[in-house]
Amino acid sequence: MRSDFEPGGQEGRSFIGEARREQIKKAAVDTIVELGYAKASLAQIARRAGISKGVISYHFAGKDELMEKLVVEFYVAGAHFMIPFLEAEKTARGVLHRYIEKNVEYIAANRAGILAVGDIILNFRDSDGSLHFKPEGHDDLVASVAGILRDGQEKGEFGDFDPVVVATSLRASIDMVSQALARDPDLDTEHYARELVRIFDRATRKDPT
């Protein structure tokens, strides 16, 4: 049987290599969810994937690179999932509603991923002891929501409020979905999304009564 590294055409090698990397990343996510970030060593990840530690080292420089890719790719995939829905909306209010719905939908469809990514963000530190993923990343998410709210205010769709404060509250509410799912795996996320839409729809109206 040919190994991943034996010749079989560039396309074949690329496909096999990508499949192997996806296998490793999935095993890493499952290992973090089960054992936590600190105990999710490359050896543990390799054991779960049914491969040798050396295979992981072939595809990733080490645990740090693997963790980096898990987080970055998770958020990139989330953006690619949501952007077409947001771009299809014609009003700022429609964008706001869809932003909430699709964020919750993405979290619900990637429950293990969001738990693992959250653990990585809270615990992945650089050699100097500082957190690898800086708060600026979350600030960018808040800023994107604040942009939606400002757009709605400028168009006369939304009322008078501080867009950064409301955006911060909205992001915190979305971030809590993963914790709610961890407590209750059977959580009705569609209902959860509808309630968030209702709350922030009222909060942004010119007359919230």
Image (cartoon, helix red, strand yellow):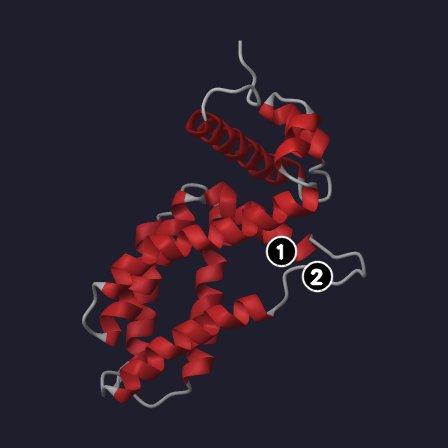
* Residue bearing the label numbered 1: 121
> Callout 1: helix, strand or loop?
helix
Q: Position of residue 176 (x, y in %)?
A: 49, 59
Number of other residues with Cα within 10 Å of mark 2, as a class: few under 14, some 14 to 19, many 20 or more? some
* Residue at left offset 55%, top offset 22%: 4
Residue beneath the point at 35% across and 48% down: 188
Q: CA distance from mark 2 to mark 1?
A: 8 Å
**Which residue lies most toward the bottom here?**
160
Mark 1, residues whose alpha carbon is within 10 Å: few (<14), some, or many (≥20)? some
Q: Nearer the viewer, residue 91 or 206?
A: 91
Q: Position of residue 40 (x, y in %)?
A: 69, 38
Q: Is residue 55 above or below residue 87?
A: above
Quarter holding residue 164? bottom left
Foreground of the two, 7 or 209: 7
Q: Amino acid at mark 2?
A: Leu
Please say whether residue 195 is visible from this viewpoint: no
Q: Secondary structure at mark 2?
A: loop
Query: Closer to the N terminus: mark 2 or mark 1?
Result: 1
Residue carrying label 2: 131
Query: Can residue 59 be seen at all in this image of the molecule?
Result: yes
Marks 2,1: beta carbons within 8 A: yes
Q: Residue at x 23, y 86 (%)?
A: 155
The residue depicted at 33 percent of the width and 90 percent of the height is: 160
